[in-house]
Image (cartoon, rainbow, N blue to C red):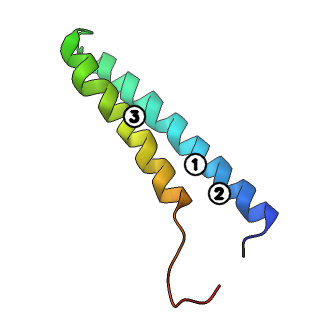
Amino acid sequence: MITLAGWMMKLWMKRTLIIIWMFLFFYLRSVFDVPENIYYILIGFPLLLGGIFFIGYLFERESYGNGKD
């Protein structure tokens, strides 16, 4: 069982990591001068969305240690 404070901390950590991931993604795109063409849409957006969903997955899954809650 998770407390309200633990749940809020977990929620803010997830949101903070997603914001940092998005900032780094767009910052590194501008640093490496990646052009915004069809390849950016076909490769860049799936990487961005995949990273966001992966971060969400890491924070949403439960710990299945020894079977005790």
Q: Secondary structure at mark 2?
A: helix
The residue pinned by badge 1 equals: 14
Please identify the quadrant where the N terminus is shown. bottom right
Question: Does residue 15 appear in this view?
Answer: yes
The type of residue carrying mark 2 is Lys
The residue pinned by badge 3 equals: 49
Q: Is residue 69 above or below residue 51?
A: below
Q: Residue at left 72%, top 60%?
A: 7
Q: Residue at left 79%, top 62%?
A: 5
Q: Residue at left 52%, top 75%?
A: 63
Residue sticking out furthest to the front:
67
Q: Secondary structure at mark 3?
A: helix
The residue pinned by badge 2 equals: 10
Comparing marks 3 and 1, which lies closer to the viewer?
3
Q: Residue at left 59%, top 42%?
A: 16
The type of residue carrying mark 3 is Leu
